[in-house]
Image (tube, rainbow, N blue to C red):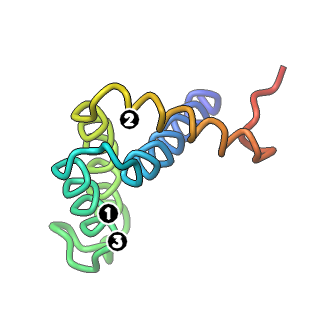
């Protein structure tokens, strides 16, 4: 079970970094950049559909939106900038010891 959670967090973290590099890529369409900003604003905004003051539900709506929103936004990306963003994210993440795959 813990290995599945670790794999989930590793994949989600990688997708967040890929989305960051895709946002900074000059050939990324404006709609993808706008959706990325809207997603980040909602997650970090104090105004939510479900307030964060509720113990579990407040964080669950943000996590659900991230889990659905990030892959959906990445699917809207053209292949060339997306491929370059994955490469840049992998190079960035390979520098961190906790991210390296163990043999």
Q: Earlier in the sequence, mark 3 or mark 2?
A: 3
Q: What x and y, as percent, mark residue 41?
A: 27, 69
- Label 3 crowd (10 A; few <14 / some 14-19 / many >=20): few
Q: Residue at x 21, y 62 (%)?
A: 38
Q: Residue at x 40, y 48 (%)?
A: 25
| Quarter assignment of residue 9 | top right
Q: Mark 2: which secondary structure?
A: helix
Tell me how far mark 1 sits from mark 2, CA to CA.
20 Å
Q: Which residue is mark 3?
A: 44
Point out the frontmost of discs 3 and 1: 1
Tell me how far mark 3 sits from mark 2, CA to CA.
26 Å
Asked whether, in this view, residue 42 is left or right of residue 20, the answer is: left
Of all residues, the one furthest to the front in this rendering is 26
Q: Which residue is mark 1?
A: 40
Viewer-proximal residue among 11 and 3: 11
Q: What x and y, as percent, mark residue 33?
A: 26, 54
Numbered circle sitting on residue 81: 2
Image quarter of the N terminus = top right
- Label 1 crowd (10 A; few <14 / some 14-19 / many >=20): few
* C-beta proximity under 8 Å, tags 3 and 2: no
Asked whether, in this view, residue 41 is left or right of residue 22, the answer is: left
């Amino acid at each position: 079970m813990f290995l599945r959670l670790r794999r989930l967090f590793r994949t989600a973290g990688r997708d967040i970094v890929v989305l960051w590099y895709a946002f900074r890529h000059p050939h990324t369409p404006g709609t993808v950049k706008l959706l990325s900003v809207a997603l980040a604003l909602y997650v970090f905004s104090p105004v939510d559909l479900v307030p964060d003051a509720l113990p579990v539900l407040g964080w669950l709506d943000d996590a659900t939106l991230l889990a659905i929103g990030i892959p959906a936004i990445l699917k809207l990306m053209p292949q060339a900038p997306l491929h370059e963003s994955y490469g840049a994210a992998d190079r960035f993440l390979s520098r961190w010891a906790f991210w390296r795959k163990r043999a």
